[in-house]
Each structure stands twice: as structure tokens, then as C-alpha cells.
Amino acid sequence: MKTPFIFGKVASGDDFTDRTQEISRLKMNFLSGINTIIISPRRWGKSSLVEKAACETREENTNIRIISIDLFNVRTEDDFYRNLAEQVIRGTTTRLSEIQSFVKKFFKQWIPKITFSPDHTQEFSLGLNWEEVKKQPDEILDLPQRIANAKGWKIILCIDEFQNIGFYNDTLSFQKQLRSHWQRQPDVSYCLFGSKRHMLMNVFTSPSMPFYKFGDIVFLEKIKTSDWEQFITHRFKATGKDILPEQSIRIASLVENHPYYVQQLAQQCWLRCIEKITDEIIDQSHEALTLQLGLLFQNLTESISNTQLNYLQAMINEETRLSSSEIIGRYHLGTSANVTRIKNALGEKEIIDIQHGKNEFLDPLFKTWLKNYYFKGK
Ligand SMILES: Nc1ncnc2c1ncn2[C@@H]1O[C@H](COP(=O)(O)OP(=O)(O)OP(=O)(O)O)[C@@H](O)[C@H]1O
Ligand SMILES: [Mg+2]
């Protein structure tokens, strides 16, 4: 039987819960041509949110085209341009003849080579000469605007894992290039999202960076307990299994409402439950899940220095004054300048999140594993 919980895939349709405010904000931005930037830690639901908002916008507006580009494996500038050109064409036409005419009409400085897949589906790829693209990227960057203009459409480009542009050679000039084109496109807007908060904040909020004040920045939050309560309870009941509302709340709170883990833990509970869930089943599932991730966490601790681990231990023990001399002494943290360095290093490794002066573990199960296994008895 198919389990009623999903994780590791974009949540859509019935699997998607809540986020009503974020969806309306995104849809409003899409309709009014406002650029949006979405930032959240990994697996909090950015891709699912954008897809949901895009889906609803498409259904309600026939003159809008929303095009998705995922940069997760796009590590160079030429790959970026090729992806952009291909996805824009794929997102605006499905007819073979039109693909050819688009290329003829919109590329004048140099002509990309189109290769169609042998089975004559709409699949195609563009061959670009990188030397030419590098000299003249304008026609690719302006392609969405020129198509939008020719068709009388509005186009929205949603670019996932946007932080990857930080890996390109000379990323700053590249960003300048993008920004200078993107800000002159009246019929195209951009929704850029990703998970490296540190890097994205630098790109979008530093006055010296090209993308400064590019658009509306959304810091995605986790999904609220009340929504998880309803979602989990409903999913159990709909599949003939019994759960109390407080037990659904317990599932969500054991993993601090982290969307991916809530779904994963709920699934483990559901699989163990025959008719009626018990608190023991929830605890066993939580423990099994933590242990299942143990090897991964073991490797992670190997990439963390001893003083950084000491700092994490102080956090787990809920010490508040982490830079006081007493705590520094007790946990062997070195000097107070060292404490700041440790904190920043853990932030850059995405182990902790520093928000409003408060440190939090980004992975709630890593915290549980450290507490219940690694630091146990220490
Ligand atoms: N609105 C939602 N309703 C229910 N579950 C959700 C929702 N959003 C996210 N999830 C859960 O979290 C998981 C991760 O979601 P998603 O892939 O959208 O996150 P992401 O922020 O894009 O992650 P990454 O940073 O890895 O790209 C989903 O597979 C699903 O289990
Ligand atoms: Mg994603």
C-alpha cells in the first residue's frame, strides 16, 4: 500500500499543506511582475512552494508562462546559458517547427545548433559555442523578454539552487551581466531561490553587490504545528489508522516542525502502526530514524573540530552565555574571539543557524543524535 507521507520529492497536490500566506504573496508577485527571492535552510519546502504557486498561477492565467530552471548541477557559466536558452524555449513552445523558428528569429549574432532526439519527441538540445556566448550573451539573456513580447505574454523564470552561481569563475561580473539585462525586461520577472542563507544574503542584501534590492525577499519559515496536526491526523484517519491530535503534535515537535523530517517520521510511525498509534510507537520511530541517520551524522562529526563539538555540546546543554569566561572555561572553547570564530564556522557549515542573535541546530535529528548517543555520559 502506498504510504500517505512523502519526503525527498516536491510536495504537490494533496501532499502539500499550509503556506497559504506565502502562496498568495508569491502569486501576487508573479502577477505584478515583482521579482522574488526565497531563502530557507535545506528541505524546508522552497521548491514545493514555488511549484505550487506556479501551478495555481498557470491555471488562473492563460497569458502567463512560468519556466523553471534548476541549477543544482549547473556549475559553469556556459552550462547556465545553455540551460537558460533550452528551458526558455521548452517552456514557451512544444512544436518542433516553432523551436526552429524561435532559434532563427531570436538568434542573429550567432546561431546555436539544434539537435533533436532521434525518437522525434519534442526533446532537443542546443549546441552553443562558448567563445561566442561569452562575447555576446545578450541574445540568450534577452530571449525571455523577446519571446514574451512577440507572444504578448508575461514570463516568470523560477531559478532553483540559485546559490550555485557563486561557484562560477568571476561570479561578480556574471551577476552584473545578469542584473543589467534582467532589470530592463518589462514582461519578465524572476523568482530566485536557494538554501545557502549566508551566500544568498550577501548576494541580495549587500549594497556593493549587483543584485542588491533586486526584489521581495521571503525568508521561508517552517510549517506551523497546527497545520501539521491537521495534516498528520487527517492522513492517518484517511488510511484507516487512529491517531490523537496530541500525538500528531508530538510527531511534529520531536523534529521541531522540520517539513522533511515531519513527513519522514510520520511515515515511520504509520508503517509501525496497525490500527491505533501509541506514544511508544512514536518514540520507537523517532529513535529508529535517528539511528538510521547515525552513519551520516558520524561522518559529519568527523568534519567538525573538537572545539566546535564542545560548542555544540554547550548548545545542547542549553547554556545561554556562551561567550562568558565560565562557559569558555568549562567547555574548553579557547578565547572569546575563538567563540565567535567557532560560531561562524558552524554557521558556514550549515550546522547551526544564527538568527536574531540566537543559535539553533539546522538539523533537529543531528541534535538528538549528539545528545542521546554521541555526548551521552560525557
Ligand atoms: N507545504 C508542504 N506540505 C507538506 N510537506 C512539505 C511541504 N513543503 C515541504 N514538505 C516536505 O519537505 C520536503 C522537502 O521539500 P522541498 O524539496 O520543497 O524543500 P526545499 O527547501 O526545496 O529543499 P532543498 O533545499 O533540499 O532543495 C518534501 O519532500 C516534503 O516531504
Ligand atoms: Mg529545493
Image (spheres, helix red, strand yellow):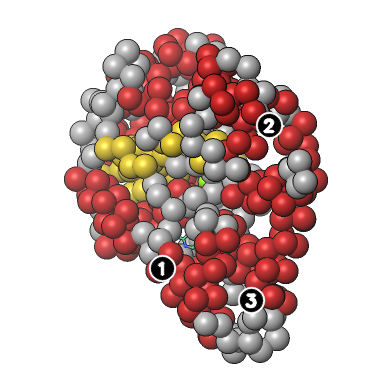
Density class for disc 2 (Cα within 10 Å; few <14, some 14-19, many ≥20) is some
For marks 1 and 2 on the same chain, the one whose residue lies earlier in the sequence: 1
**What label does residue 44 carry, if any?**
none
What's under tag 3, amino acid-wise?
Answer: Asp
Nearer mark to the viewer, of 1 and 3:
3
Instruction: Please determine whether, in this image, residue 128 is positioned above or below residue 63.
Output: above
Task: Tell me the distance, in whole angstroms, between the alpha carbons under discs 1 and 3.
Answer: 20 Å
Q: Secondary structure at mark 2?
A: helix
Give coordinates of residue 72: x percent, y percent: 58, 36
Give coordinates of residue 251: x percent, y percent: 57, 67
Q: Quadrant of the N terminus?
A: bottom right
Taking the spot 48% from the left edge, 52% from the top edge, the residue there is 45
Taking the spot 52% from the left edge, 82% from the top edge, the residue there is 244
Residue at label 2? 309
For marks 2 and 3 on the same chain, the one whose residue lies earlier in the sequence: 3
Q: Quadrant of residue 21?
A: bottom left
The residue most toward the front is 326
Task: Tell me the distance, in whole angstroms, between the alpha carbons under discs 1 and 2.
Answer: 34 Å
Residue at label 1? 227
In this rendered view, identify the residue nearer to me: 255 or 358: 358
Density class for disc 1 (Cα within 10 Å; few <14, some 14-19, many ≥20) is some
What's under tag 2, amino acid-wise?
Answer: Leu
Q: Disc 2, ligand 1: is the CB inside 8 Å? A: no
Task: Tell me the distance, in whole angstroms, between the alpha carbons under discs 2 and 3.
Answer: 32 Å
Density class for disc 3 (Cα within 10 Å; few <14, some 14-19, many ≥20) is some
What's under tag 1, amino acid-wise?
Answer: Asp
Residue at label 3? 279
Instruction: Please determine whether, in this image, residue 338 is positioned above or below residue 121.
Output: above
